[in-house]
Image (cartoon, rainbow, N blue to C red):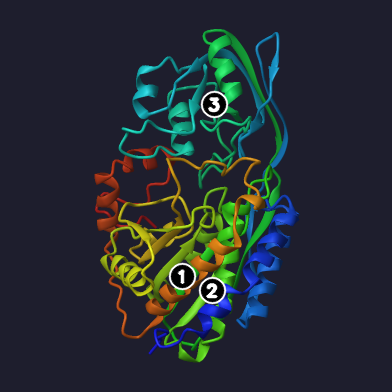
Amino acid sequence: MTDLTERTDWIGETFTSDAGWDLLEDLVDVGNRMAGQPGEREGLELVRDALAEAGCRDARIEEFDLQGWVRGDAGIADGVRREPCIALPRSPAGEATAEFVDLGHGLPSDFEEGDVAGNVVMVSTDVPDDFDRFVHRREKYYYAVEHGAAAFVFRNHVEGCLPPTGSVGTEDDPIGQIPAVGVSAEVGARLARRAEGDSVTVSVDCETPDATSGNAMAELGPDTEEEVLVSSHVDAHDIAEGAMDNGAGTATIVEVANALAAVEDELDTRVRFVAYGAEEVGLVGSSVEADRADREAIEAIVNVDSNVFGRTLSLSTHGFDDLTAAADRLADRFDHPVSTSEEQVPHSDHWPFVIHGVPGYMVSGETEGRGRGWGHTEADTLEKLEPRNLREQAILLTALVADLADEGTAVARRDPSEIAAALEAEDQAAGMKVIGDWPYDDDGAVAE
């Protein structure tokens, strides 16, 4: 049995290990890890080598083709002044001159009721506290497209002169349809005050070459047909170090690999580690892997994304009762807080598997408020993270993975129609359909 409850030596080794933090420092020092660019490849190689050094076997990078995107200049001008902004990845190159309209939070009703057609629209990165769900950037962008906007301006709700990034585009059309830029909270406030109802020009310069990305992966434990998948993503946005999102998650799974390698002989089930490329531009790497892998052989997925900034682990279980039970066992064993939620989280690398009913966690760090905070801005830097948090979380996740790999642990799958129904009940389906991310047919089966 994969039972680590009688041993504590691995806990001490993990709490004093530098393997994860050293990798995190190496990843942030790469600089630009944008999908399909040289820094992403360097990051993938660092992870491959770290997994091999941990003792994993068959450490490798599996490549795939990618729609690339390379940043140029961007601007917003009202004829008198030019405001600083950044293009959102996969925005098309182009220029739009039209009336400026501030749509506030950019809720679906704001687009229905606002003066959108033919205009430049600005929306916030957050939603009101009393709104029952988070509205993703891409959903807001495609509401703007659907209602005929000329350009899209994404305003940060976090102060600090930090324009936000984040991709647009869909799987079928990777490059978006209208120019899209991010502006800081302060620039957004100036635009709302000075430019409302006036003509502004939004311009984006970029290149969209063919590119190559990849997934770094390796394995531990017996060569069983079944496996537990432990994942993260290596890529980050080109404006930042990507320390929290997602150097932290990648460093954490490497630390888990080091811990499990020390007890490999006790594993009942193969554990495969995958650090995906191209997550930030539409979950491309994990979608490639979900199509390639034998999904029936995957017992469970532990996907770690943006975890170390918040000290308490937050586990989204997507309504898989056995995953909730495993999280409860973990919290009880260590007498340690672990936050759980059954809501669907369709925005990280577990999702291309979960849509098929594969049991999967989305693992992050619990933080105050809604939205990304410093994530997706140039403020996502190393000094905001602590080695203590990484080590504590690696210990907890090692025990969780070992539990899931135990031959005595059964995790029931869900029918895809149940996932579809949950998305409908949580009011997420309509937005996913606008984005082009709705994977189900009328019967709740995944459309192939």
* Secondary structure of residue under mark 2: helix
Q: Do the residues labelled 1 and 2 touch (CB within 8 Å)?
A: yes
Q: In which quarter of the image is the C terminus?
A: bottom left
- What residue is shown at x 64% (from left), y 46% (from top)? 237
Q: Nearer the viewer, residue 166 or 253?
A: 253
| Residue 272, label in figure | none
* Secondary structure of residue under mark 1: helix
> What is the x, y in percent for residue 387?
60, 62
> What is the x, y in percent for residue 325?
28, 69
Q: Do the residues labelled 3 and 1 touch (CB within 8 Å)?
A: no
- Mark 1–mark 2 Cα distance, whole angstroms, equals 7 Å
Q: Nearer the viewer, residue 343 or 332?
A: 332
Residue 319 picture quarter: bottom left
Label 3 sits on what residue type? Answer: Phe
Q: Is residue 433 left or right of residue 376?
A: left
* Residue 277 visible here: no
Residue annotated with mark 3: 152
